[in-house]
Image (cartoon, helix red, strand yellow):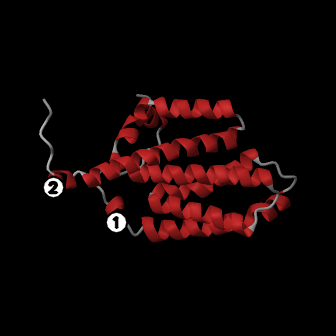
Amino acid sequence: MTPPPIPAGDLAWLLPEIVLTAGALLLLVANVVAAYRMLRAVLGSRWAALFGVAVTLTHGALGELYISTGTLFDRLVFLFIAMGVATYAKLRSARQQLRIRDTVLLWLLCLLAMDSKESGVLLPVLLGLYELCFVRERSLGARLKAVGPTFALLAVTSVVFVFGRVYRTPVLLQTAGYHVDPNIGTWWQHTAH
């Protein structure tokens, strides 16, 4: 016995949810690819990158992120941050000095990350840490010549973003109980499920 057909009018209200869920799953797949590319660029090993992605995919605290469509902005900011770090690592390994189009590409990725979520403002910081930890330059002058203009643009963009968006968003700052708790115990408690 077959179930009765569902009228087309009843399916219409499901369509936005189906599209949203499909888009969220596609974005999750894009994040896995971006995470692999980022880890491969940073770690330099295909196996280490695969291990990092496997640990991320099986971590218990991230289950909600994978199945909830309410975390689209988290997925977007991760995508743009991972793409930004992978792109920067590739550009710095390919050439000594960043070109104008390289700077524009990194700037656009930073804008997309910041527009996705406020934590996207950390992308320039991550790029700076990558530069300091993984790029070997002979002198400070050579480093400033190679990446100085790019980081100047990213720094100005970040400052404008912080003062223009975060401080003018009183809803976030006035939320009851909202406070920063930079405590390793709190972090460990929330991530070690």
Picture residue at 32% right of the left edge, 63% below the top? 171
Q: Is residue 99 left or right of residue 9?
A: right
Can the viewer see residue 155? Answer: yes
| Residue projecting furthest to the right | 138
Which residue occupies the foreground of this view, 154 or 176?
154
**What percent of the width, then of the height, locates residue 65?**
39, 41
Q: Is residue 98 left or right of residue 50?
A: right
User: In the rendering, which numbered label is found on residue 170?
Assistant: 1
Q: Which residue is mark 2?
A: 9
**What percent of the width, then of the height, locates residue 177?**
30, 50
**What percent of the width, then of the height, locates residue 41?**
69, 43
Quarter of the image with the N terminus is top left
Q: CA distance from mark 1 to mark 2?
A: 42 Å
CB atoms at circles 1 and 2 under 8 Å apart?
A: no
Badge 2 amino acid: Gly
Q: Is residue 190 left or right of residue 31?
A: left
Badge 1 amino acid: Pro
| Secondary structure at numbered mark 1 | helix
Picture residue at 58% right of the left edge, 33% below the top? 52
| Residue projecting furthest to the front | 1
For marks 1 and 2 on the same chain, the one whose residue lies earlier in the sequence: 2
Front position among marks 1 and 2: 2
Picture residue at 87% right of the left edge, 52% below the top? 138
Q: How many marks?
A: 2
Which residue occupies the foreground of this view, 35 or 13?
13
Quarter of the image with the C terminus is top left
| Secondary structure at numbered mark 2 | helix
Can the viewer see residue 13? Answer: no
Q: Quadrant of residue 190?
A: top left
The crowding category of the residue bearing disc 2, from other C-alpha atoms within 10 Å (few below 14, some 14 to 19, many at least 20), is few
User: In the rendering, which numbered label is found on residue 83?
Assistant: none
Which residue occupies the foreground of this view, 155 or 183?
155
